[in-house]
Structures are given as C-alpha cells and as structure tokens.
Amino acid sequence: MKIKLLTLMVSTPFFINATEIICAGQGNQGELIEIELNYFEAKKEVQIDDMLYPIQIDNKFAIAWSNTADGVDFVNILSKINGSLQVIMNDEEGNQNLRASLQCVEAKKALF
C-alpha cells in the first residue's frame, strides 16, 4: 500500500497540467507512424517516450521543437489550427526533407 501511494505521489506532478496528444499518419516511405506526446504549456516542454524536449516556438498558431535520433536532426511543427504535425529531417549537408506528416488530436477528444 505504501509503495503504491509513493509511486502515485512521485509520478503525479509530472503529468499535472499536461495535454495528452495522440498522432497518426505516414512516414515518407509509406510506413504507419503513431505517437503519443504530452504538451506542458506552462513548462514549455513536450514529452515523447519519457524524453522531454524544450519547445522552441509556442504561439497561437503552432508549437515546434527539435530532437536528434541516430545522429539525425529533426524539426517538429504541430499546428494548433488543424492538428497537423510535420516532421522535417535535416541531413548532414543541411538539406531538409519531410520525414512524416501526421494528424493529431487531444487524446480526450479522440473519436473512440
């Protein structure tokens, strides 16, 4: 009982005031991509797979953040207007390519 309560107390502050967002769409090679993220508006952070990323742009139109995976830089732009998430890959030469295009909704507003 004490362990469960302690676990709840430790994990609860991290998700207070977070907006849970779910996204699905296709990558540039036709693969299905599904992600879940937590948007912390007050802290200006996005959490994906237990990793926190600082938000670089946060206005009434969009939020944007960047991350690196396997040595590749990505820029992520999530529209607050239509829920689209564009994932742009930056290669070693500085070229940008669309890596994925996803549609996102707040998890509690999902259809089912």
Image (cartoon, rainbow, N blue to C red):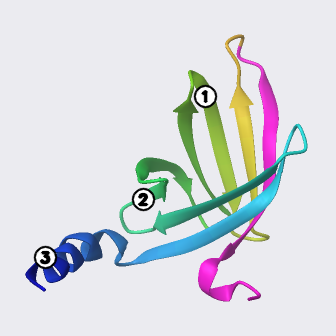
Judging by the rendered image, the residue that carries numbered circle 3 is 3
Question: Residue most toward the right?
Answer: 30
Q: Nearer the viewer, residue 49 or 45?
A: 49
Which circle's residue, 1 or 3, is located before the other in the chain? 3
Residue at x-position 16% and y-position 83%? 5
| Residue type at tag 2 | Lys
Residue at x-position 41% and y-position 54%? 50
- Residue 89 is situated, as x and y percent measured from the top left of the image, at 71, 31
Judging by the rendered image, the residue that carries numbered circle 2 is 44
Residue at x-position 82% and y-position 51%? 101
| Residue type at tag 3 | Ile
**Residues under labels 3 and 2: Cα distance?**
31 Å
**Residues under labels 1 and 3: Cα distance?**
40 Å
Q: Which mark is residue 73?
A: 1
Residues drawn in magenta: 94-112
Which secondary structure, mark 2?
loop
